[in-house]
Amino acid sequence: MRAYSLDDVHATRKRKDSWWTVFLVDPVACRLTLLVANHTSITPNGLTRFSLILGMCSAICFAAGRLVPGALLFYLSFMVDCMDGKIARLKGTGTAFGLWLDYVGDRIRVVCCAAGLASGQYAVTGDIAYILLGAGVAVLDLFRYVNAPQMKRVREVVKENRLGRLAAVESVVATGHVRPAEAVAAAGHAGHVRPVEVVMPREAITPREPMRVVPFEGRRPGPRGGKRQKLPRRFGRLLARHRVRSHLLSGIEFHAAVFVVAPLVGRVALVPLAVASGALLLLNEVFLIYRMWLFSRVVPAAPLVEKVPRVSV
């Protein structure tokens, strides 16, 4: 069996990940992955099942009112969940069923831990706010995971339509059966591509002097904000160097705040941290939906090849 190195494991990390994973999970998970890869024959699906077992133990601790053990078990469950993907990429043993199992296991862990946390604190305090807290955490997590693949599907459809429209415009321009201004407008709507200018001779087009397409040399709009954008760009480059995603509060940070940080702090932090992290996560989802809406307005729902204007020559 091949002996893997820590560099091999590092190469399996995601190109960008949440800051919680990058700084507080991966440093330990990568070393544990190295031990598992070199000294055991555990499969990625085996790690996923073990992660789910740890998650269920965490939910039981939360239901019993044991916040600190529940938080530590949830952290270990997430760490093992990060290891299964690394093992799959390292050994090339990933399967389609493993992807499904990992996805469903995450949802089961979150829902059970939310139910355990809510029921355990309600049993101790009798405060209905904890029941609402558990329901809100479960609903928000499920919405995020239902919404994400749908947004991805919309982006893929828009990209396909954009490429189809651009190809149709280029084909029409190549035949010379399009007015210059209309060709430029159509190409501009085809997506984020460099504009073109259709150059025609003063006389009628002849086979010796066909219409040609040259790059548009007009003034291109510069970045807005000037120096004010340097700081965000530097911050973005800093995050990229450390493999951290630009949106700093995703589902992973939300889970960490609710099931790790708040229980470790104590009962007094459960509701405030859950509400604050949930509100930030919801704002992030709204922002992503808004960006998707802007992205989907680039082209219509389907390529409109037949509507490209044509004229006889």
Image (spheres, rainbow, N blue to C red):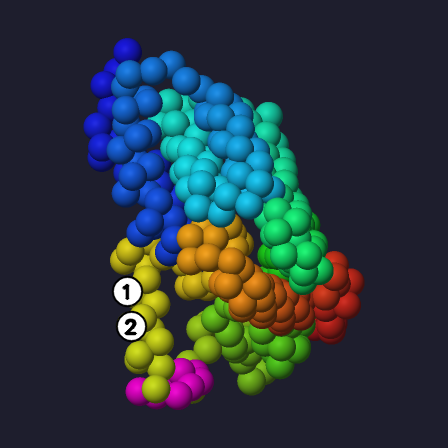
Q: Amino acid at mark 1?
A: Leu
Please state if 35 lies on the left or on the right of 293 as rendered: left
Q: Amino acid at mark 2?
A: Arg
**Picture quadrant of residue 59:** top right
Residue at coordinates 41% horizontally, 18% vertically from top-left?
42
Q: Residues within 10 Å of mark 1 (few under 14, many from 20)?
A: few
Residue 226 drawn above or below residue 63? below
Instruction: Choose between 241 and 116: the one closer to the eye.
Output: 116
Please state if 154 lies on the left or on the right of 73 as rendered: right
Which residue is denoted by mark 1 in the rendering? Answer: 238
Main SS of the magenta part reads: loop
Instruction: Choose between 25 and 200: the one closer to the eye.
Output: 25
Which residue is denoted by mark 2 in the rendering? Answer: 234
Q: Residues within 10 Å of mark 2 (few under 14, many from 20)?
A: few
Assess whether mark 1 and mark 2 are in contact (beta carbons under 8 angstroms): yes
Residue 166 percent across, percent down from the top left: 61, 61
